[in-house]
Amino acid sequence: MARVSLKVNGKARPLDVDPQTPLLYALRDHAGLDNPRFGCGLGQCGACTVLLNNVPVRSCLLPVAQAAGKEIVTLEGLGTPEHPHPVQQAFIDEQAFQCGYCLNGWVIAAKALLDRHPNPTEPQMKAAFEGLVCRCGSHVQIAAAVRRAAGMRKTA
Amino acid sequence: MTMPTPSAFPSRRDFFKTGGLLIGFSLASPDVLPQLAAATPAPGRLDAWLRIGADETVHVFTGKVDIGMGVQTALIQVVAEELDVAPARVHMLMGDTSATPDQGGVGGSTSIAAGARPLRNAAATARLLLLQLASARLVAPVDQLQVKNGIVSRKDDSSRAVSYGALAAAQDLNDTLRVSGGGFAINVEGSGKPKDPATYTIVGQSLPRVDLPPKILGRARYSTDVRVPGMLHGRVIRPAGAGAPLRNVDETAVKAIPGYVKTVIQGNFVGVLAESEWSAIRAASELKVTWGSPAAVFPLDLYAHMRAAKPKATRQLTAQGDAPGALSRATRKLEASYLWPFQAHATMGPGCAVADVRSAGVTTVWTGAQKPHALQKGLAEMLRLPEDQVRVVWVEASGSYGRAGDEDVAADAALLSQAAGKPVRVQWSRADMTAWGGKGPAVLVDLAAALDPQGTVAALELTSRAFSGTEIIPQPNTAGNMLAAQLIGMPNTNPGDEYVQWGGSTYAYTIPNVRVTGHIIAPLYQAESPLRTTHLRDPNGPAGTFAAESFMDELAAAAAADPIEFRLRHTADPRAQAVLAAVAGRVRWDTRPSPKHGGTGRGVALALRGGTYVATVAEVEVDAHSGAVRVKRLVCAHDCGLIVNPGALKGTIQANLIQSLGRALKEEVTFDQTRVTSVDWNTYPVARWSDVPEVEVILLNHPEIAPSGAGEPSSRPTAAAIANAIFDATGQRLRRVPLRLHTTGSGP
């Protein structure tokens, strides 16, 4: 066990944890957050995505010690019910997702993509999203939400 | 022992009954909760289904659960409609065996068709009772009263008004209901009659799904997020193949893992317990477990095995006219065989449950399983506890698409909790889920047909050879149903024989001579096997429809007929004709026989399921060099009778089209002689971003027809539509799923 000083959603979160513990379990079991989520533990699905210094990373593979001192943002920290992040609002407006278990990864990846590329091209979207799984198949609404968030939603 | 608390779900604390009495809104200490009786409310009382709070909230109690398709929102609309209240006032409590009637849980796309009926009738009865109470209060006959958003007023003087909440607070709102049916079909009827659908103002509207904003804002809780004080984390270690006996467990290496608690061994069940999930994961991977040889050797050539195996059971499913005679006399006869692999639920979140098993008092299990009341029975039997001492609380989970494994992980958690004397949370690993979760069965279908000189089908014979979709029945109501129970030696006592029929179950075509025969292939291993089969979304529907609707396309091509025209030639069913016409119109269907060749093509398939009609058109592009298939567009026309929520329905169908595209093009459980080798997303690939085509859904609404199911039917035609489009584009007929042009060539 060691003291690892995390900064999560703008707040200092010192945790007593094995420094080799993946960030996912540190956030879920030690910091008590519900997002990120466990999907595979193998970096293949993206359900565990968090922002680390504004870069989306797979928290299931990253030892918590490597996140020390960096800005961690989880889905809970993106916006609030009163003030959703615009990307969250776009997903809400498009009624994206079926079960929603995967959405943590999609919403965070979309936010990071749009920060870098406010009007993403199809290849940029593919690069951002091909590594994510949505087992229910909600991709059509997800794509609509990303376009809506980018303000490039085509008029029907 | 630490008392568990469901404090993660304070809203669920508000309603628990002892002896039929409502404890109300102020249940003091959560510690009291586990001591409360776990009996399921009897369905013959109105207040088992619906209660109205003094704050005007309408509390609905349903044995249905929401597996991620938005049925909660639709059920809210049904109740709000009958009561004339704003949907926002309706609060649903779903799938708690101590607080909700048993409606069989979720399955068979029945949640609206059958599951909404008792709620509709209970709400209609509540409305009538409230009007009768208001009649006395407002001194006016019931027919002189009106209701607007839960306020009852006199038609002649709307200032004389009283709210539902005030009426319900003053007097016990209860009635005896007539109960009929059971399981999915359970219904109740009281004195109130439901509205005429022609007058609906809430049902039929695209109410936004109530569950999505909290999820997207990171405020929703899933079964994975249940945490109770004193809880340990568990992981299971699966055998080295079906029926492999446990030889030895060496704990030496794992004892040094911080937070490691112990290893639990019962028969061939092995699980580890730790104070944190990461420690449990480490212990599960570092524990030295030695297994004997598997009891079953899996066939290297699955379909050869299915072809050669002596069937376990055989049934003639349809026999009309004289198909064998007509086929033997036929001048033009076609034959083909179609293959469908084992497929996995592979849920996004591997199964998860928390169990707090107590030898005295109430055992509580929090789970995402689709059938909580059945699970209560199975777990009670496995734990050797009285059924009414086991409470199963459903908590929303990752979409399950059938009997995915939430039942099995609940049994894992329950066994570990019983052994530890503490609450235990288990979330499966990805490999536990993909390799060891139940499987949709592999299916082989032989078809033969006689074409007459006019180009119509004179006779058709279908013979299926399939593993039963119910080696494990989808209702987890007996102990041997669960993997953990099988590992401790409890037999699977109630497997079923589920046969594959033409198009899944029913078909729209008029053919004079038809014979359908189903054979069931014996399980590869009767008990703990990673290839044990159970219900996967639309059981046998995609497999049977892939065969039937590919074959219809082969017949159309043989008759040099356009595929849609050929289907219309064989059906007099106006709803089948309508979905075909709708989809043909939308895609501007190019009327001509297939194949066209040239690397692009279109294909159609039609399917019926439980009163729902679906026609899907696929447009594909095939790379002549690599054989890679790209689906460019999927268009689906869907008629499920009355539509409760068009927006949510469209979302479910769109997603189902993508999921079924993945099943058609990519999904196949692979295995060697002892193990399933599909263990993760690389070895069990599903549809990804780059696979997704343009998708359009055409909803045909029939308010005059009672709603039928919509969760599954649109998964049915997709594979055949794509295969038929590939044939149009290339002239090659693919008869094996996953559809692969470069490896499958012209099929079996």
Image: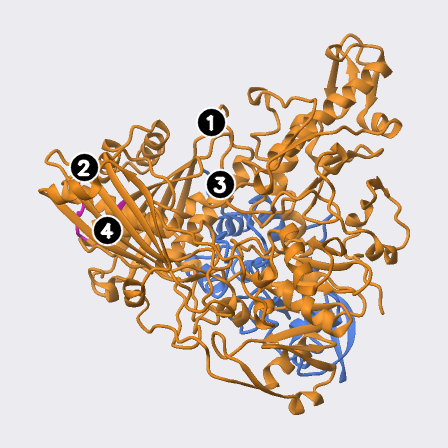
How many angstroms separate mark 3 from mark 4 (CA)? 30 Å
> What main secondary structure does the magenta stretch of the protein show?
loop
* Residue topped by disc 1: B702
Residue drawn where x is 55% and y is 76% of the image? B238
* Residue topped by disc 2: B458
User: Label 3's element?
Assistant: loop
Asked if residue A9 is positioned above or below residue B160 in the image, the reply reads: below
User: Label 1's element?
Assistant: loop
How many angstroms separate mark 1 from mark 3 (CA)? 14 Å
What color was chain B assigned in the picture? orange
The subunit carrying tag 2 is B
* Dot 4 amino acid type: Thr
Q: Position of residue A5 (x, y in %)?
A: 76, 78
Whether B601 is among the magenta residues is: yes
Asked if residue B690 is positioned above or below residue B330 in the image, the reply reads: below
* Dot 2 amino acid type: Ala
Q: Earlier in the sequence, mark 1 or mark 3?
A: 1
The subunit carrying tag 1 is B
Q: Position of residue B128 (x, y in %)?
A: 73, 21
Whether B370 is among the magenta residues is: no
Q: Residues within 10 Å of mark 4 (few under 14, many from 20)?
A: many
Between marks 4 and 1 in the image, the one whose residue lies nearer the viewer: 1
* Residue topped by disc 4: B600
How many angstroms separate mark 4 from mark 1 (CA)? 35 Å
